[in-house]
Amino acid sequence: MPKRNAKRSTVKKRTSHKTTEQAATNRAARADNAATGRTANTQRGTTLVTHAVGAIPILQRLLRRMRLRDFLQQHLPPEDARTKVAAPRVILLLLTNLLVSREPVYGVAEWAREFDPQLFDLQPQHIDQLNDDRVGRCLDRMARALNTNLILDVVRHVVQEFDLSLDELHNDSTTVSFCGEYPDAKVERLLAGLMAPAVTWGHSKDHRPDLKQLLYILTVTNDGGVPIYFQTASGNVVDDQTHRATWTLLAELVGRKDFVYVADCKLATTEQMRDIASRGGRFITVLPATRKENTTFRSRLVEQPKSIKWSDLYHEVDEDGNLTDAMQVCADEHATKEGFRLLWYHSLRKQASDAAARATRLERAMNDLTTLRDRLTGPRTRFRVREKVAAAVDAILGEHAVRELLRVEIEELEEASYRQATRGRPSPQTKYVREVQTRFTIRWEMDGVRLARESAGDGVFPLLTNLPQWTAREVLDAYKRQPIIEKRFSQLKTDFRVAPVYLKNVERIVGLLAVYFFALMVQSLLERELRRAMDSAKLPSIPLYPEGRPCTRPTTRRVLDYFAPLSRHTLTSPTSRKPESITTALTPLHRQLLQLLGIPTTAYDQ
């Protein structure tokens, strides 16, 4: 009996010791943010949790300056009171994810788990509630908020906060491709007061005619290429139907009508130009190749080249003093049928580029024609009728845009073959039947007259404007800044990988595209602030590239990647009352970048 009691006492002591150790472990697990973290190691009640920090403090400072959360709270539709994670916080988290990591919607929570939730103004328990359905419902609210003044209010504040110039605005559009049928989005329909665009086929700027698409229209400033407005339209909408509505919205946003609106040749329709000009608008665009004025001038280049007088604008040379470009303008100004100024320019660099592009098209077309000819003469050819051969030739010429430069002739060939009239082993008395089979072949030659006619226009391009006081050089310089918006589209398609989108709800797609718009805005503002600070500090470059190589035009992507390794480590033990925090040491370049961006280092020390 005494032995039995001793045994029970021993078991009780062991259990008590285990319970005490487990309690200490539980206390450590209940430390702030211990539910998240990239790595968490627990040993003898001591817990080490590592949270990524990266460039999140930099992005959060920009978002606070933009007051994006305030505007989202103001314009997003009200939510159920039982909602534990507010939609503005989810939208801002998704926006930060797009800038830093570009995880899919269903992976946002897993990505956020690596960071300190307080960086996103969240609690650890909120992370588990950020499933793809929650993010999708927040995108629904984002789409409905576009029917309010959300975009206008944000942009107006950003213009004032960052002192953006709105004197010159550049507009263009691209297409966003989609995989899937989208049966509920075949036609435009009204959703919560917002006209939802149709996901359908159209002219694909991604060269994917097999995929449905939406049209994404973007307007950026000349000052830093900052996006200030975007629109989505159905995939089959043509660009020349959008400029009047876009200009009207920009006039409301800017608060005046004397800004210069720069766009591509789709603006150059009589109705759009006259409408904008009648309301006091100013524009610069390209004359379409289909206009009569274009045909008339290029005919003069061939028939009367000496009648056209060119005046030099400027010359460009490389570091060795070699001439790289010579820009000229036609001394005699022309006018369109609407009465707007028409300026003709000639570029030596563009002349060489046009000639090289045409030579490439001709070479590829002739290679394809050679392949087609080999297929025609093959023993198993499927081209048995002339119509099929003609269709194949036309497809090749059309694909490479050389219909007027190559003359292709289809020739018929007769191939005779003989077979025995009867079965059996052949003999001198065997009779044979002659069979004739028609085959086709092709031959082609260059049209020298048309080639010379097209070569005469190499390097020549027309710009159209209603700015009477601007010089030819000022008009040209303004249009040469149009590639600013192409850079934003490139970032949209490559950095953010916006296409193809897999969301099945068109309302959520529109909401996601709005988040991408804000992501482009944040990215461009960060680049603008950093580059302006470098100019103020008279820094020609900073060693931001690998191996400390100088970077003269730092990008947001480069800055984010450089800050990515920064982390915060939290050590919690049963003996310490307060967790110990250790952060990755900042390098001199980290501190220099933070100083240029006006961000105190305490943002990483805390």
Image (cartoon, grey):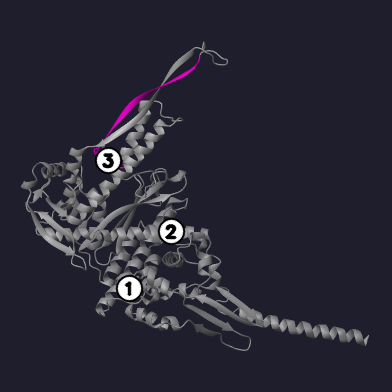
> How far apart, in angstroms, are the residues tagged by discs 2 and 3?
50 Å
Seen in the picture, residue 518 relative to 587 is either above or below; the reply is above
Query: Which residue is disc 2 drawn over?
Result: 141
Disc 1 to disc 2, how far (Cα)? 41 Å
Disc 3 target residue: 402
* Picture quadrant where residue 349 is located: bottom left
State the SS at label 2. Answer: helix
Q: Residue furthest right?
A: 1
Tell me which amino acid carries mark 1.
Cys
The answer to which of marks 1 and 2 sits earlier in the sequence is 2
* Apparent side of residue 488 relative to residue 605 in the rendered image (left or right): left
Tell me the tag on residue 590. Answer: none
Q: What is the crowding at mark 3: few (fewer than 14 residues within 10 Å), some, or many (at least 20)?
A: some
Three-letter amino acid code at disc 3?
A: Val
Percent of width and height locating residue 13: 79, 86
Which amino acid type is shown beneath numbered disc 2? Arg
What's the residue at 26%, 80% (across, down)? Answer: 537
Label 1, label 3: how far apart the Cα atoms are: 42 Å
Considering depth in this image, is 470 or 117 the residue closer to the camera?
Answer: 470
Report whether 99 appears left or right of 327: right
Residue 112 percent location from the top left of the image: 50, 69
Label 1 vs 3, first from the N-terminus: 3
Does the segment drawn in magenta span residue 419?
A: yes
How many C-alpha atoms fall within 10 Å of the one at disc 2: few (<14), some, or many (≥20)?
many
Q: Residue 129: say if magenta.
A: no
Q: Nearer the viewer, residue 499 or 196?
A: 499
Can residue 333 be seen by looking at this rendering?
Answer: yes
- Dominant secondary structure of the residues highlighted in magenta in the image: strand
Disc 1 crowd, CA 10 A, few/some/many (<14, 14-19, 20+): some
Q: List the residue tagged with mark 1.
A: 551
What segment is highlighted magenta in the picture? 399-420
Q: Is any part of residue 241 visible from this angle?
A: no
